[in-house]
Amino acid sequence: SQQGEEDPQALSIQEGENATMNCSYKTSINNLQWYRQNSGRGLVHLILIRSNEREKHSGRLRVTLDTSKKSSSLLITASRAADTASYFCATSTVGANSKLTFGKGITLSVRP
Amino acid sequence: DADVTQTPRNRITKTGKRIMLECSQTKGHDRMYWYRQDPGLGLRLIYYSFDVKDINKGEISDGYSVSRQAQAKFSLSLESAIPNQTALYFCATSGTVKGNQPQHFGDGTRLSIL
């Protein structure tokens, strides 16, 4: 069963614009992680936010976590064509001992 | 060289055949995982192993088996392949700090069962 649900399922933006992707989950978490998958490749870890953190930055990425709403958002600022990929949120739930449950993913297309 | 290597990258085989997918890692991680990815369904966990003597079933283990031959090697077997096992399979590793480690993925094996 899916723990994380991303929204929207697909997003198309112009290069230079910001991209915001959302993830909602159902049960208490230890942490939430975002991954990127380029076509034909494995997933690459982008950022991890712990349950006691509210916001985290890494380069052009900004992740927020609202545990009261059981939701997270990933913001990519000043997008580039190279950001075109699928993005997945994954949750590590309490008691799951480092297992991750992945959402279905968001397909981001950045037009040059 | 890739930290997590999967072989083969592509495989086409027939229903009923036995298939083994292999994964090796140079990251020195104790924890290894096998996932399958289907269009529109995200990744689902098949089996995972926290050390050489530890094997655990994931969400969808039926029809699959695994072997953890060494810290660096974790193989996935389909004893008698069926068409609905056609999917993209990923191996991943993670460190041992409980609950707060990212996973590192190989580039996948695309498996087609006719």
Image (tube, rainbow, N blue to C red):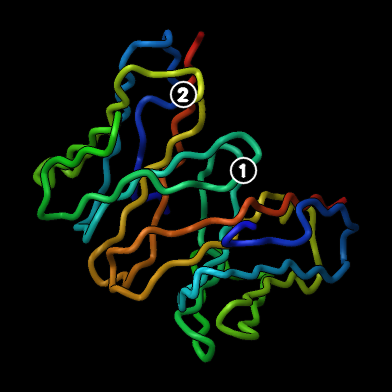
Say which residue appears at 80% left-offset and 50% top-offset: B112
Q: Position of residue A29 (x, y in %)?
A: 22, 58
Disc 1 crowd, CA 10 A, few/some/many (<14, 14-19, 20+): some
**The N terminus of chain A: image quadrant:** bottom left
Say which residue appears at 39% left-offset and 71% top-offset: B95
Q: Which residue is mark 2?
A: A108
Residue B42 position (above or below residue A27): above
Residue B11, by quadrant, is bottom right
Query: Mark 2 and mark 1: span between their CA atoms?
Result: 15 Å
Is residue B53 or residue B57 the one in the foreground? Answer: B53
Q: Position of residue B66 (x, y in %)?
A: 64, 77
Q: Residue furthest front?
A: B1
Q: Is residue B14 left or right of residue A33?
A: right
Chain letter of the residue carrying label 1:
A
Disc 2 crowd, CA 10 A, few/some/many (<14, 14-19, 20+): many
Q: Is residue B56 left or right of residue B61?
A: left
Nearer-N-terminus badge (2/1): 1
Residue B8 position (above or below residue A20): below
Could you tell me which secondary element the residue under label 1 belongs to? loop
Q: Position of residue B81 (x, y in %)?
A: 80, 64
Q: Which residue is mark 1?
A: A41
Q: Is residue A33 left or right of residue B45?
A: left
